[in-house]
Amino acid sequence: MISFILTLKRLVTALIHAFKEKEFQVLFFLILLTLVSGSIFYSTVENLAVLDALYFSVMTLTTVGDDSFTPSTTFGKLFTMVYAIAGIGLMFGFISKIAFSMQSGYLNKDKKEDQK
């Protein structure tokens, strides 16, 4: 449990650090827009509950996947192909920015300790 709390603290610190960069803010907005549009699509076209649609959108963009749902309509399948191709790149950029912020936090911490 302590490990989880420490990791969560590192993640929150990295997010705060990353939000100071304009590029991260743009990626964050695009990811939100992509997830909202995917959720709206899946809830209306595929008749999923809003939370299920958001869950499927996140699972698709993070490439985790979920076997419990596959689009049933032809339009849904076409949309999912385009959605995955466009969205996975955005999600990768977003996650890599967070990872870079976490890493740079360690580098800055090490530099401060070396200066002492």
Image (tube, grey):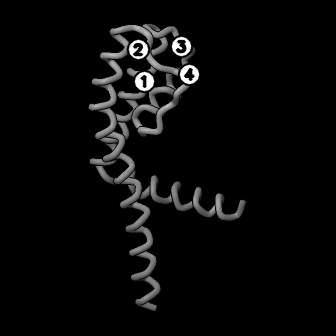
Name the front one of labels 4 and 1. Answer: 4
Does residue 105 sit above or below 76 in this rendering? below
Q: Quadrant of residue 26?
A: top left
Q: Which residue is mark 3?
A: 48
How far is mark 4 from mark 1, CA to CA?
12 Å
For mark 2, does the 10 Å Cα neighbourhood hold few (<14), some (14 to 19), or many (20 or more) residues?
A: many
Dot label at residue 41: 2
Residue at 33% x, 37% y is 88
Residue 17 percent coordinates (x, y): 42, 58
Q: Secondary structure at mark 4?
A: helix
Q: Which residue is mark 1?
A: 36
Name the front one of labels 1 and 2. Answer: 2
Q: Secondary structure at mark 2?
A: helix
Residue at 39% x, 82% y is 111
Dot label at residue 52: 4
Residue 90 percent coordinates (x, y): 31, 39
Residue at 30% x, 16% y is 78
For mark 4, does the 10 Å Cα neighbourhood hold few (<14), some (14 to 19), or many (20 or more) residues?
A: some
How far is mark 3 from mark 2, CA to CA?
9 Å
Mark 4–mark 3 CB contact (< 8 Å): yes
Mark 3–mark 2 CB contact (< 8 Å): no
How far is mark 1 from mark 3, CA to CA?
14 Å
How far is mark 1 from mark 2, CA to CA?
9 Å
Looking at the image, is mark 2 or mark 4 earlier in the sequence? 2
Residue 54 percent coordinates (x, y): 50, 25
For mark 1, does the 10 Å Cα neighbourhood hold few (<14), some (14 to 19), or many (20 or more) residues?
A: some
